[in-house]
Image (cartoon, rainbow, N blue to C red):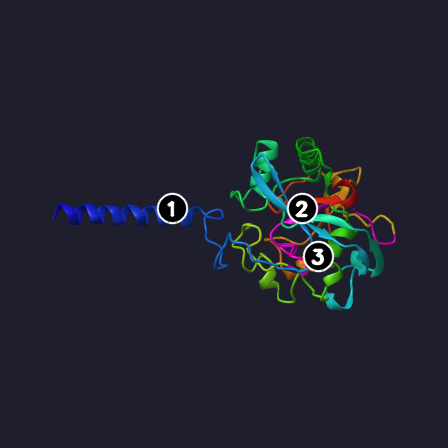
């Protein structure tokens, strides 16, 4: 009788531990990916990667071989979805650069800054609620710690990488024409971000370039002809200096249109919403 009771207590303890580990994963609900936090192996031949460790947190950068591509509202983006700021489609040439395999995680942000500002709280989720200005401060500290020159990607670099660089297959989204394969968005995210690299990567082995959180770029927001866009009164009231910067990739709170590789979003350089994050970049000469 005594042995039976002890066995029952042990079984209940194991079940309690298993339940706790599952329920806290990914901000309270388990993601519907069948292996939520485990990376889907990209296995891209000929693509160089480098692993970095900062304050005990490891992350990977992917080398993107530069080239010339058509940026903006290309044919696969559809006839009606592209907005005025995605036109005209135009040729752009970018040099070689490095870009983060994933968005910057909360674990890395906290290791560098000492705090976690995010709405969705889980170390392997992308950091969120960070402004363009916050990202620049983060980069300054990161570069002091590493002696390297990490930066935000240029918008043209970001789109080239999202399209798959020289390996591009002409997808509408980053890595697929099926949005559910590659992105956490309003239809599947359950109102929160999810651990990075829990969806399929794109042709370069980059994760979450469609969906999860928006990613700040270095560039100020201008039309493709170099002119200033027509700002709404709401935007003008938020910052009279018109210091708006580009965000790319869509997020967990929006639909497929915003997750297209050519979609452009403008954000006030100080605003920080629950879907604003970042991805690291680095020039080849700054390795």
Q: Residue at x 21, y 49 (%)?
A: 8
- Residue 111, how many percent across, how many down? 58, 35
In this rendering, would 103 be left or right of 221? Answer: left
Instruction: Please name the residue that numbered disc 3 is placed on.
Output: 162
The residue that disc 1 covers is 20
Q: Position of residue 40 (x, y in %)?
A: 56, 58
Residue 217 in view in this figure: yes
Label 3: few (<14), some (14–19) or many (≥20) C-alpha neighbours in 10 Å: many
Is 20 on the left-hand or right-hand side of 33? left
Earlier-in-chain disc, 3 versus 2: 3
Magenta highlight range: 202-225
Secondary structure at numbered mark 2: loop
Disc 3 secondary structure class = helix
Considering depth in this image, is 188 or 105 the residue closer to the camera?
105
Q: Which quadrant of the figure has residue 285? A: top right
Please give the label number shown on residue 279.
2
User: Which one is nearer the viewer's eye here, 140 or 88?
Assistant: 140
In the rendered structure, are the residues bearing label 3 and label 1 in contact, judged by CB atoms less than 8 Å apart? no
């Amino acid at each position: 009788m005594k042995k039976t009771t002890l066995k029952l207590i042990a079984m209940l303890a194991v079940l309690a531990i298993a339940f706790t580990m599952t329920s806290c994963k990914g901000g309270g609900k388990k993601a519907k990916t069948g292996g939520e936090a485990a990376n889907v192996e990209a296995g891209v031949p000929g693509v160089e990667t480098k692993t970095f460790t900062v304050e005990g947190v490891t992350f990977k950068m992917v080398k993107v071989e530069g080239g010339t591509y058509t940026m903006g509202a290309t044919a696969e983006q559809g006839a009606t979805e592209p907005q005025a700021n995605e036109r005209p489609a135009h040729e752009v040439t970018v040099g070689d650069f490095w870009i983060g395999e994933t968005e910057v995680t909360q674990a890395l942000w906290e290791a560098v800054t000492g705090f976690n500002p995010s709405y969705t709280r889980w170390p392997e989720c992308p950091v969120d609620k960070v402004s363009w200005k916050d990202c620049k401060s983060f980069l300054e500290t990161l570069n002091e710690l590493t002696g390297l020159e990490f930066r935000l990607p240029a918008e043209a670099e970001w789109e080239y990488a999202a399209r798959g660089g020289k390996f591009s297959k002409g997808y509408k989204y980053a890595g697929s024409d099926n949005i559910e394969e590659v992105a956490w968005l309003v239809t599947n995210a359950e109102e929160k971000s999810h651990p990075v690299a829990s969806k399929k990567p794109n042709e370069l082995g980059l994760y979450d370039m469609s969906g999860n959180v928006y990613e700040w770029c270095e560039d100020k927001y201008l039309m493709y002809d170099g002119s200033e866009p027509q700002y709404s009164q709401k935007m003008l009231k938020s910052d009279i200096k018109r210091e708006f910067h580009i965000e790319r990739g869509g997020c967990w709170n929006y639909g497929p249109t915003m997750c297209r590789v050519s979609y452009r979003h403008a954000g006030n350089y100080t605003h920080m919403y629950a879907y604003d994050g970042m991805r690291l970049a680095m020039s080849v000469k700054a390795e």
